[in-house]
Image (cartoon, helix red, strand yellow):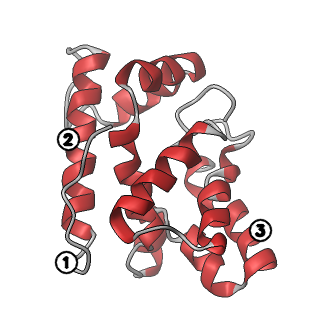
Amino acid sequence: MIFGVHQFLWHPYTVYRAWKSLYGRPNWREFICIIIHDWGYWNSPNMDGPEGRRHPETGARIARWLLGQEYGDLVLYHSRHYARQLGIPPSKLCWADKLSVIYEPKWFYLLRAKLSGEIHEYRINGKHEFGLDRSHSEWFDWLQGELVKLAEAKRGDAIPYQFERG
């Protein structure tokens, strides 16, 4: 969280930008949720393993305590894995979280991913979709394209928007 992809200052900024592009400016409660949604990664030994998959619980607990059930659910279900387990559609925060990658300068994302070691976990977990033989830069371009397609498909038709990379 200090050096990684989910860096506690930068990642909420990119999620905020994505939220704003998808849904308009978040209210103050949604803004708090954007800030705390990944706090469960603190001290987690992995991102996608058993501990990492439970990361939404921490932010959801804080959001429920501060803001109520609705906002706890917004945080908890930003995880597609969590939502799938319970048979619930992912929350709006999920799609802003996924789309946030378009606001990432490639060099900065890859630097953070390398510093934290996350790049290896992400690449190994995605080896069937992309492979391991190409560069991290090519992988990032592929990942960015896949996440944009996913966010565009899931955002719904309520807010027409052309995503601008920035």
Find residue 61 and name its label: none
Q: CA distance from mark 1 to mark 3?
A: 31 Å
Q: Which residue is mark 3?
A: 62
Name the kind of residue labelled 1 in the image. Answer: Asp
- Residue 120 at least partly seen: no
Q: Nearer the viewer, mark 1 or mark 2?
A: 1
Callout 3–callout 2 Cβ contact below 8 Å = no
**Where does residue 80 sit, x and y in percent of width and height?**
41, 64
Secondary structure under tag 1 reads loop
When the figure is inspected, residue 97 is found, relative to residue 116, above or below; the finding is below
Residue linked to disc 1: 157
Res 96 visible: yes
Q: What's the distance in space between the residues labelled 1 and 2, CA to CA? A: 20 Å
Please state which amino acid type lies under the numbered disc 3.
Answer: Ile
Q: Residue at x 39, y 27 (%)?
A: 105
Question: Of marks 1 and 2, which one's residue comes earlier in the chain?
Answer: 2
Amino acid at pointer 2: Gly
Circles 1 and 2 in contact, beta carbons < 8 Å: no
Q: CA distance from mark 3 to mark 2?
A: 32 Å
Numbered circle sitting on residue 145:
2
Label count reads: 3
* Residue for point 40% across, 47% down: 100
Mark 3 lies on a secondary structure that is helix
Q: Secondary structure at mark 2?
A: helix
Quadrant in the rendering for residue 73: bottom right
Residue located 21% across and 63% down the image: 161
Q: x, y percentage for residue 151?
A: 27, 59
* Mark 1 Cα shell of 10 Å, populated few (<14), some (14-19), many (≥20): few
